Image (tube, coloured by chain):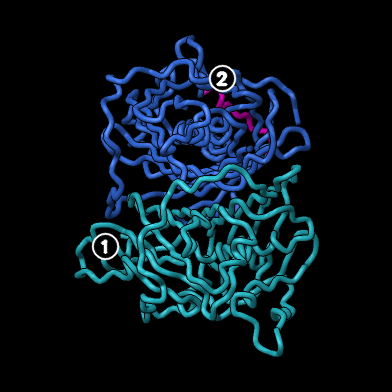
Chain colours: A blue, B cyan
């Protein structure tokens, strides 16, 4: 892997790029290959925030010259740790049809595969439509105070999170919480008009459901994440700097793994993305 | 691709193998490569039932000599049609850790990639556990009549389905159904003690949610399917020939794609698997 320094995201009027755009910088490094690097703004405890890794894989396909259409689904498998510094992404179109395109991803550091994944892109058309699920009730975002100091990890500062339910595990230690539902209004911080990569990152912005269920911290980490995109670029662009409502819940915790189902809603009630993950936990 | 005939699944006491075991027959064909073929018992309208393709990819990892642990997650991307006849599967372990293993799959016919996918396997241990989701109420399987003649496709005969809700789109044509929930008791037919591959197939056994929602048939097909396994081999073996309760619902239909969330429950109320898919539809 080359260790050549990367160009930062384009600056506008001399200002610094948005930290998210900076994290999405990928330099072409041969056919289907891109060179990126971790950034401080999205650092978690011992590696980058999983959401930024998911977004970066998607970004490689989004900026690939052979890209067809917009993201429909994205699966990311967190196979091993990512160290601070450069990484290489292989984003390979495995099959391109008339209106759909399939992608395969690998993120490597040196010889080690750290992350794998796949995506489906499609050219979407207007059709009969129906939002069967209904956005949960929540007070308006501007009436809800931002969450502060939940955990001492850097990437949380990259988001404005305004919890309306399940903010943090506040029950007495050892007490089980009746459910694992967390909901918050969410926006990039500083505010940034969302794109598909931003939505991919949002879908991993919940702390592990077991923290809430067991009312305390236990070792836990996402092993696989799948997101479905139910929106188009114009709808995302029209969101501007409004918050979205993010909701997540687990269905079962068993033998070291639990699931999480999440939804990302616009303030106006559109379901922008649904996302599922399976998460390792200890004890 | 070789077109050598494949050995059928081992017969027991001179009887024919179960059709599912027959469909799972994969012959080693080089490092990380297996040769399989479609079978008549799981034929859908213009290709094999998607669930049997998902099960076959998983089977390649299950019988791989380097396999570690049991399946935690499986993602299958249906990239193109599979024709009747032989196919080759590449099942490659992309990273093996102390207790987890990541897999990458490609199913090819000739030079064409028809299906891609990935899986995570893990050695599971007993931990604190909690079933947060609760099995929906349903009358006992042996009190519910089997569904007959829903659609003229062969693979439906490979399952005993006993619907308790949303059996088929019976509302007047053009009328929207209030929701997209389908639930049925499910078992392989003939009865077969389930394994992980059987569960992978079960998760794709629902007809497309849009048939129910719009009370009629429209062109539709799964493009990506992700299943999480919440059970172990001993629990599956103990199910014997009992039915499981399968439940599915969509959250949103928009611009040619809808999602489906599904659960597979044991009769005793254990959540064995959760599964999500994104499905193409026309009009």
Crowd tier of the residue under label 1, counting other residues whose Cα lies within 10 Å: few below 14, some 14–19, many 20 or above: many
Q: Is residue A66 in view? A: no
| SS state under label 2 | loop
Which chain is home to disc 1?
A: B
Q: Position of residue B2 (x, y in %)?
A: 74, 73
Report the residue at 51% width, 49% height from top: A120
Q: Where the N terminus of chain A falls, by quadrant?
A: top right
B90 vs A19: above or below? below
Occupied quadrant, residue A111: top right
Q: Is residue A277 in view? A: yes
Asked if the residues shown at circle 2 and circle 1 are in contact, with their CB atoms under 8 angstroms apart, the answer is no
Report the residue at 71% width, 88% height from top: B13
Magenta stretch, residue numbers: A21-30
Q: Verify whether residue A24 appears in magenta.
A: yes
Q: Nearer the viewer, residue A39 or B264?
A: B264
In the picture of the structure, the residue carrying the numbered disc 1 is: B214
Which chain is home to disc 2?
A: A
- Structural distance between the alpha carbons of marks 2 and 1: 47 Å
Badge number at residue A153: 2
Q: Where the C terminus of chain A falls, by quadrant?
A: top right
Viewer-nearest of labels 2 and 1? 2
Report the residue at 33% width, 49% height from top: B252
- Left or right: A222 with respect to B11? left
A102 vs A269: above or below? below
Report the residue at 40% width, 41% height from top: A273
B239 vs B273: above or below? below
Q: Position of residue B99 (x, y in %)?
A: 72, 45
- Left or right: B163 with respect to B154? left
């Amino acid at each position: 892997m080359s260790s050549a320094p990367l160009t930062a995201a384009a600056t506008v009027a001399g200002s610094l790029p948005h930290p998210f755009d900076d994290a999405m910088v990928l330099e072409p490094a041969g056919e289907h290959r891109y060179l990126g690097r971790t950034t401080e703004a999205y650092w978690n405890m011992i590696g980058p925030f999983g959401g930024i890794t998911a977004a970066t894989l998607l970004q490689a396909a989004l900026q690939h010259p052979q890209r067809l259409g917009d993201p429909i689904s994205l699966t990311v498998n967190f196979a091993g740790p990512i160290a601070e510094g450069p990484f290489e992404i292989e984003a390979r179109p495995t099959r391109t049809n008339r209106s759909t395109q399939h992608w395969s991803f690998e993120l490597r550091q040196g010889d080690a595969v750290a992350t794998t994944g796949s995506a489906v892109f499609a050219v979407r058309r207007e059709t009969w439509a129906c939002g069967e699920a209904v956005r949960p009730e929540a007070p308006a975002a501007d009436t809800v105070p931002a969450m502060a100091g939940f955990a001492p990890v850097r990437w949380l500062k990259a988001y404005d999170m305004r919890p309306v339910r399940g903010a943090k595990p506040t029950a007495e230690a050892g007490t089980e919480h009746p459910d694992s539902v967390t909901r918050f209004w969410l926006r990039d911080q500083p505010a940034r008009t969302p794109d598909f990569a931003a939505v991919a990152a949002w879908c991993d912005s919940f702390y592990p459901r077991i923290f809430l269920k067991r009312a305390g911290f236990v070792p836990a980490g996402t092993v696989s994440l799948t997101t479905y995109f139910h929106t188009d670029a114009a709808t995302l662009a029209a969101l501007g700097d409004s918050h979205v409502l993010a909701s997540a819940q687990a269905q079962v915790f068993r033998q070291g793994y639990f699931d999480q189902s999440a939804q990302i809603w616009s303030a106006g009630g559109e379901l922008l993305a649904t996302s599922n993950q399976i998460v390792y936990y200890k004890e």
